[in-house]
Amino acid sequence: MAAAVAMRGGSSDSGGFDKVSGMDSGKYVRYTPEQVEVLERLYIDCPKPSSSRRQQLLRECPILAHIEPKQIKVWFQNRRCRDKQRKESSRLQAVNRKLTAMNKLLMEENERLQKQVSQLVHENAHMRQQLQSTSLANDTSCESNVTTPPNPMRDASNPSGLLSIAEETFTEFLSKATGTAIDWVQMPGMKPGPDSVGIVAISHGCRGVAARACGLVNLEPTKVIEILKDRPSWFRDCRSLEVFTMFPAGNGGTIELVYMQMYAPTTLVPARDFWTLRYTTTMEDGSLVVCERSLSGSGGGPSAASAQQFVRAEMLPSGYLVRPCDGGGSIVHIVDHLDLEAWSVPEVLRPLYESSRVVAQKMTTVALRHLRQIAQETSGEVVYALGRQPAVLRTFSQRLSRGFNDAISGFNDDGWSIMGGDGIEDVVVACNSTKKIRNNSNAGITFGAPGGIICAKASMLLQSVPPAVLVRFLREHRSEWADYNIDAYLASALKASACSLPGLRPMRFSGGQMILPLAHTVENEEILEVVRLEGQSLTHDEALLSRDIHLLQLCTGIDEKSVGSSFQLVFAPIDEHFPDDAPLISSGFRVIPLDTKTDGVSSGRTLDLASSLDVGSATAQASGDGSPDDCNLRSVLTIAFQFPYEMHLQDSVATMARQYVRSVVSAVQRVSMAISPSQSGLISGQRVLSGFPEAATLARWVCQSYHYHLGVELLNQSDEAGEALLKMLWHHPDAILCCSFKEKPMFTFANKAGLDMLETSLIALQDLTLDKIFDESGRKALFSDISKLMEQGYVYLPSGVCMSGMGRHVSFDQAVAWKVLGEDSNVHCLAFCFVNWSFV
């Protein structure tokens, strides 16, 4: 082996050469093929070994015995660099392919629009000429013929006319999907690009509500059509879809008569159903089309038991156009055009039924996102936790969502019936004695007597409460609203022993909550996770028994970039072994914005002081001048909790359920007041930093102390002062944390990157202590350097792993800690800066 050395940080084109730092800059280290093979195997097991690990490798591998530790370090650095470059190259190639396809799509759309404009100009000129050469009477007659509206609903009583209805539906659908039959406008907040779901538009000034989307998916057209026709698999609001009749159309296509039911989004409105004709055919260019429209009559209606719970809505010509794409994949056009009969709901909730944007968010873009998700899972790009198959985890998400929707809607034909109240109608309690919990063997769990499920639910109007912020708070701070004894009671339903009412086995919630992510959708708009709640028994006899509770949890809309029609937190207790056929009893929260003009505007807002950093001063935020949309935002919150019961305990469980939901409602009201933009800002910011200097002063002390101890500037523009300096510190890319200078250091401030790393908010930051975010080795490394920190004022920490407030592991390349000195030169707190952190 030819050994040589070179400059630091270099890399070579061959896997057998590397440069080494600190020595002769003109030479390289040449590795033998056997050495490269050994190093590659080591890289697969540990791509970023620590110094001690590298020393161990040299001792355990004789073939590497004559290589310096610094050379091994540089080899791993260069290997990681090459790996990163290959991944980036693959990503850029994929983006280029997608941009090429989207560019072709936009050029075709532009060409169609130009032809449409030319045709309209020609027709306009011809019409003007006719108007000048005819009489007023003829003009009036002509107008009466033109303005006669067609019959919007078609009768299916005459089978011979179904083909003509199908062909007419086909023509009208294509005119919406690829033409200008509807005045389309780009949906706000949905700009086309390589990372976007597609090109999304909503209707302007047409009958009903309509949305159109076009995107590229890496699936074959036949597979796309198969997925889209199975609407309940991707449209969470679809309760059922039944094909009553199917027959060939005579031209290679098929005609189906379909009855579909949709869930009610909240307890305050009835559900919707549709009776439609669905036509599937193939065009001459190989494109596949599925188009659909409503039929008149009561065909396929609901059962008599639940007839009063549905309002018949109308589907105007809608559907899917799927074209094969050069190089593989498909270009998908989706049109959803509905008349949801808004007159049948209270006026305050009518925006849910009169907004094309809501249709785009709930149906149109959801379909495209689901196709992208399936494409990534099929290609193997998605790897989920616990070794679960994507289809299994997707089924869990669907079951959680369906169980929650069933609880909210409470359809009579599912066995639900309303129970008598206590004179106060704030909480609705329903009973279902036909619904059974299933265990692994698909047999009903044995209770002391026959039982069922009781559901307690309520809806309330929220004012000036950002939905995403509320749902994130409910997710991250369960102890603020939940009763651990109730969770224990619900979890006991999964065991073979009989259920007992809370209080018989007193428990105490330790406050610990660990979240294990399982799966998420492409754009993180939906997250599936397992939550472990740490409990403690209050009796000595049960002290040795584990009282932890596990929940399967589905979060929707909590991502900062989420722009959705609803924000949800749905959960169900599960057995710790978590089998694929685990029984699920869904409960949770759903927040639906009513003012669609502000959908998603507040979703990225961070609690308290964070909200003021982007709009100016905290005072302006507190007065409502910073974000007027936040202060005028209205939304409807729906809460539903399900409780299994034994027959002899039905009344007791119903009373307990009603009281518990009332306590949850009260807790949510308190939280809503705390996070409302009109209530937060400067007051909450001062509460977070209680006993500490104002945020701007603290930012100045942090930066000055960093320069004093390390001799370099923390920020590029250190001459800034006041709120300008605070804003720069807030947006610094590295995670900066401050903790109290006490025996048990408690975090008191973090910039945005720090809050993201810890997965918490400024209010909840005080719940975290310094020792909680480090593992055993991290704590040892920190405590061993405490004396050095106190002596010289700062200390560098090597690369390692810490933990977020949600229990996730976070790796970082380097960290530095320093003492923050005040005006009196006394130590006020400690500051930490974590460089290049990322979730493992």
Image (spheres, rainbow, N blue to C red):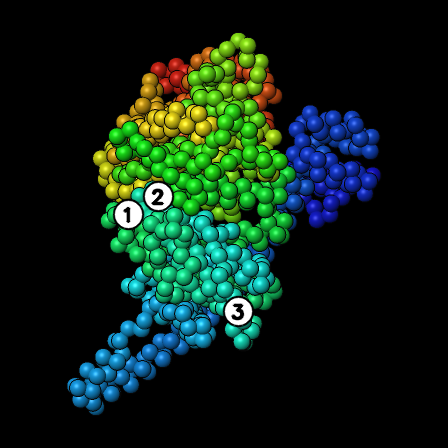
Spatial CA span between label 1 and label 2? 10 Å
Spatial CA span between label 1 and label 3? 40 Å
Number of residues whose C-alpha sits closer than 10 Å to that of mark 3, classed few (under 14), some (14–19) or many (20 or more): few
Residue name at image x 44 percent, y 66 percent:
277
Q: Find disc 3 in the rendering and name its residue.
A: 247
Residue name at image x 52 percent, y 27 percent:
447
> Is residue 116 left or right of 248 when viewed as pictured?
left
Q: Extreme left residue here?
A: 136
Spatial CA span between label 2 and label 3? 37 Å
Q: Single out the mark in the foreground, 2 or 3.
A: 3
Disc on res. 772: none
Q: Provide residue 561's location: percent of width, then percent of height.
A: 42, 45
Secondary-structure class at tag 3: strand
> Which amino acid, mark 2?
Thr
Secondary-structure class at tag 2: loop
Disc on res. 349: 1
Residue name at image x 30 percent, y 64 percent:
207
Disc on res. 266: 2
Q: Quadrant of the N terminus?
A: top right
> Is residue 206 left or right of 401 when viewed as pictured?
left
Count of number-bearing discs: 3
